Amino acid sequence: MNYFDQSLASIHKQLVNQEISAKDLTQQTLDNIKSVDPDINAFITVDDEGALKKAADVDAKGIDADNVLSGMPIAIKDNMVTKGLTTTAASKILENFKPIYDATAVDKLNKLGTITVGKTNMDEFAMGGSTENSAFKITHNPWDTTKVPGGSSGGSAAAVAAGEVIAALGSDTGGSIRQPASFNGVVGMKPTYGRVSRWGLIAFGSSLDQIGPITRNVSDNATIMNAIAGHDNHDLTSSTKEVPDFTSTLDKGVKGMKIGIPTEFMAQGLDDDIKQTVLDTAATFKKLGADVEEVSLPHTKYGVAAYYIISSSEASSNLQRFDGIRYGRRAKDVKDLEDLYVKSRSEGFGDEVKRRIMLGTFSLSAGFYDAYFKKAAQVRTLMINDFTNVFKDYDLILAPTAPTPAYGIGEDVSDPMTMYMNDVLTLPVNLAGLPGMSIPAGFSNGLPVGVQLIGRPFDELTVYQAGSTFEQETDFAKQTPKMGGNN
C-alpha cells in the first residue's frame, strides 16, 4: 500500500467496495514496515501476528461503511499501554513489560476497528527532542537519514512521513508531537489539556502531557481526533466538554479570522528560512481573507525555566513507581531493599531521565520548593494570562514550530540561543494547556518546515479549519521524501 497519495477516506472507500480486505491492507502495511524501517528505525515493536489476527476479525465482522477508521492499520507511540503488547517507553527499565489493559485512546480506536501494527520509537520516557535518547535505537528522518526526526514522538512522525503507516498516535509534553511533525513534513496536533484522556499514557509531566494524532493531512488528523477525544471516568483531568465534529468546518475558510504572530516567537535565533516561511504563511492567510497582525506574549522569555522545573518535578514524582518490585526491570545480586532500588533504577534509567529526576527532586525539596517550583507555577499563570489577553481579540496565533529544520544525528547544537528558541516555541502551549497544531508550510535546503497554529482552549475546531484552508491552498503536504536519502 502506497500511503503517500492516500487518505483515510480513499482507503476506506476501497475497503467498503471490497477492492482490498483489511487483512490484505494490514499485510501490505507490515510489508511496508519490513521494507522501509531498516533505514528509518521508527518502530520498537512490530506485532505481525496480532495485527493480522485483528484484521481477519474485522473482515469477518465486515467493514463499517459509516466508520472511516474501520480496518485501518495505525501505529502507537510506545509510551501508551497496549494489552498484551510490549510497552517500553523506550527504556530498559520496561523492556519486558506487557500491560494488562489498553490506554483509553488506544481502546477507543480499537473499538472503531483500527489495527495496531506496532509501537514506535521515542526518547526515553518522552524526555528529549530528537529520538536519540531511546535505550534501543536512533530513529532517522526519512527526508535525510543523517538527520534527526525530532522528538519525543520521532518514531510516530517518521513512520507516517516514510509511508510505513497512514497515521500514528504521539504524545506532547513540551512540543513532542509538533516539533517532529515539523521536522518530518507531516501534521501533528497537540489537543487542549483534558481533551483526550491520559489514562494508560506512561506519565512524564502530568499537568502537561497530551495524546494527539500524527497524519499526512489535516482531514485525517481531525478524523482521528474525533475518535480519541472526550471524557473518561478513569481520568479525572479529562474534560466533560462536548466534543464537536472536528471535520465539520474544514472547508469553511478563514475569511474574517484574526490571526496574531507573537513578536517573541520571531526573535533572534530563528533560522532565516523558518522566519520567511512564517511570513509567507501569513501572506497566504491574508490572501484568503484573514487579518494577520503582530501580538505580544511578554512572559515567553521565562517559559523554558518554568517548564523544566515543573516538568522535571512532575517526572521525579511519576517515575518513583519504577522501583524494580511491582513491574519492569529488577536488578540481580542485590544485598537489601535499598540496594534493589538503587541498582534497578541505575541500570534501567538512561542519563537524560536521571538528570531530570535529580533536577525535579531538587526543585521539590523542602529548602528549595518556594524558590523554584512555586515561582515556576506563578510564571506559568502569567503566561496563561498572556494568551488569555491575546485571545480576547484574536482567533488564532501563528508561529514557527521549531527554530531550525532537522539537524544532524549526533550533532551538538553549539548556539545556545538556537537551543533556547527551540524550546520557547513549543513549551508555552503546554504550560497554558492550549491546542496547537503543526502543519507543513515550506522547505529549507530540502528539509520540511512546519508552522504552528495555536487556538483558544478547546477550540481545536478553528485550528483545524485554518490548517485545512492553508493546506488546500498550498501543496506542501503533498510533498514526500525520496526514500533512501543519504544512506
Image (spheres, rainbow, N blue to C red):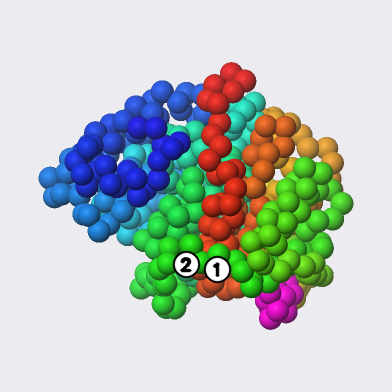
Give the tally of numbered discs: 2
- Nearer to me, 260 or 10: 10
Q: Quadrant of residue 255?
A: bottom right
Q: Is residue 86 left or right of residue 13?
A: right
Q: Is residue 328 left or right of residue 361?
A: left
Quick one: label 1, few (<14), some, or many (20+) residues within 10 Å?
Answer: many
Q: Residue at x 23, y 37 (%)?
A: 20
Camera-near label (2 vs 1) is: 2
Q: Which residues are magenta?
A: 383-394
Q: Residue at x 25, y 58 (%)?
A: 66
Instruction: Please state, as top left, top right, bottom left or bottom right, where the C terminus lies in the image.
Output: top right
Where disc 1 sits, the SS reads helix
Q: Is residue 115 magenta?
A: no
Which residue has dot 2 on it? 249
Contact between marks 2 and 1 (CB within 8 A): the answer is yes
Q: Main secondary structure of the magenta part?
A: helix
Q: Is residue 181 left or right of residue 327?
A: right
Residue 462: give its label: 1
Q: Residue 41 placed where, x, y %?
A: 50, 30
Q: Residue at x 50, y 54 (%)?
A: 218
Give the mark nearer the N terminus: 2 vs 1: 2
- Nearer to me, 342 or 392: 392
User: Residue 77: in sight, yes or no?
Assistant: yes
Q: Residue at x 37, y 44 (%)?
A: 74
3D distance between C-alphas at marks 2 and 1 = 8 Å
